[in-house]
Image (spheres, rainbow, N blue to C red):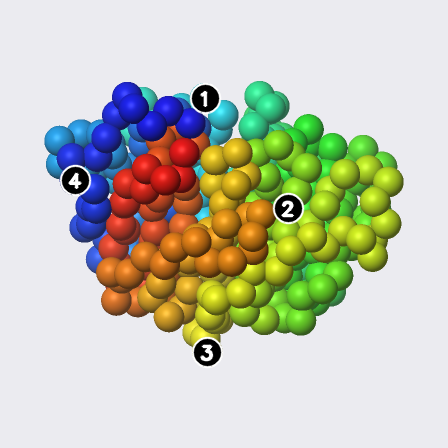
Amino acid sequence: MDSTEKHLFSSSVQLLGHKSGVYTTKFSPSGNLLASGSNDKQILIWDIFDSQCKNTISFKGHSGSILEVSWSRDSATLYSCSADKTFSSWDITEGIRIKKYRGHEGIVNSIDASQTGSDIAVTAGDDFAVKLWDLRAKEAVMEQKMNYQVTAVRFSQTNEYVFFGGLDNQIKAWNVKANSIEFSLLGHKNTITGIALSNDGKKLLSNSIDNTVRSWDLKPFVTNEDRELKVFMGGKHDFERNLLRCCWGPNDKYASAGSANKIVYIWGYDTGYIWGELMGHNGSVNETHINPKYPIIASASSDSTVFLGEIPQLT
C-alpha cells in the first residue's frame, strides 16, 4: 500500500449522486476508481483523486437493484449483479455495457470475478444456485444447486475453490475441478451476508445476521473443527436483513464491515478488538471496502450516500 503518492481533496468526502440506498461499493484494483451500486438501478463510477471526487460514468441498464459489483483484475471491466435476475459486464473506458448474462431464476445476490486473469465469474442467487461462468459464453458452465437461497460468493486465490454461504448459516467450499463440496465452515448461527478472501489467499472473512464477523483458515490439511480463527463483535444487523458485506485491510492486518446501526467498524486482526468506529451515515452501512493501494476506506449506505475517508494509520 502506497500512502504517499495520492490523497483525497479532503480527509472525509461524501459522494452524492444516487437516488436511493447504496448496497455495494468497491475500489478498482488500480486504487484510482470507486464503483457504487444502488437500489436506484444505477452504477456510478467515481474518480476518487479528481479535485472533487467526480462521478465520471453512470451505468444504466439493470431493471432492479444493484446488489454487488466486482472489478476485473486490470480495472478495465466492472461486473454487477441485480435483483432483476441478471448480471452484466461494463466497459470502463468506453462507458458502455458489454454484455448482459441471463440464467438465474431469482435475484442474483452476489458476484465475484476472477483475479487471476481468467475470463470467469461466479454468481449466487435466491434461486438456490451458485453458477460458474465463462464470460465469453452465453450460459453458465457449471452449477451447484442447493436447497436454500445463496447470498454471498467468492473465488479462492487460484480459482480452484468457490466459497459460498446463505440461509443455511454455513460456508461451503466447492472444489471446482472435482465439482464437489469438499468441506464446510461451521460456526455462524444465522444467514451469511458477506464473504471476503484475504490478500494472501489463506483466510476467509464472513459476515452474518448472527451479529458476528468471523475469520477462517483455508490452508490445506486443517481439520474442519480447527478452521474458525477469530470472532469480531460490534456490528449489528436488523429487521431489514440487508446483505451487509465485509472486507480485509492492507496486509490482512485489519477487518472491516458496515452495520445496521449506521457505523463503520474496523477491527485489528491480531487483537480481534474494535480498532476504529466511523460515524456519519444516516442509514445502514451495507458495505465497506478498503483501497488496495492507498489508506482510504469507502462505505455505502441505505442513506443513498457513499463516504470516503483517509485513514493513514491503516498503512
310 in relation to 279, above or below: above
Residue 169 image point, x, y percent: 68, 66
Q: Nearer the viewer, mark 4 or mark 2?
A: 4
Q: Residue at x 32, y 57 (%)?
A: 278
282 in relation to 266, above or below: below
* C-alpha span from label 4 to label 1: 27 Å
Label 2, on which residue?
Answer: 204
Residue 272 image point, x, y percent: 56, 55
Q: Nearer the viewer, mark 2 or mark 3?
A: 2
Label whose residue precedes the other's in the sequence (3 or 4): 4
Mark 1 secondary-structure assignment: loop
Q: Residues within 10 Å of mark 1 (few under 14, many from 20)?
A: few
Q: Amino acid at mark 1?
A: Asp
Residue 239 is marked as 3
Q: Residues within 10 Å of mark 3 (few under 14, many from 20)?
A: few
* C-alpha span from label 2 to label 3: 26 Å
* C-alpha span from label 1 to label 3: 38 Å
Label 4, on which residue?
Answer: 10
Residues tagged 4 and 2 counted as in contact (Cβ below 8 A): no
Q: Residue at x 48, y 53 (%)?
A: 267
Q: Nearer the viewer, mark 1 or mark 2?
A: 2
Is 214 displayed left or right of 69 in the figure?
right
Q: Amino acid at mark 3?
A: Phe
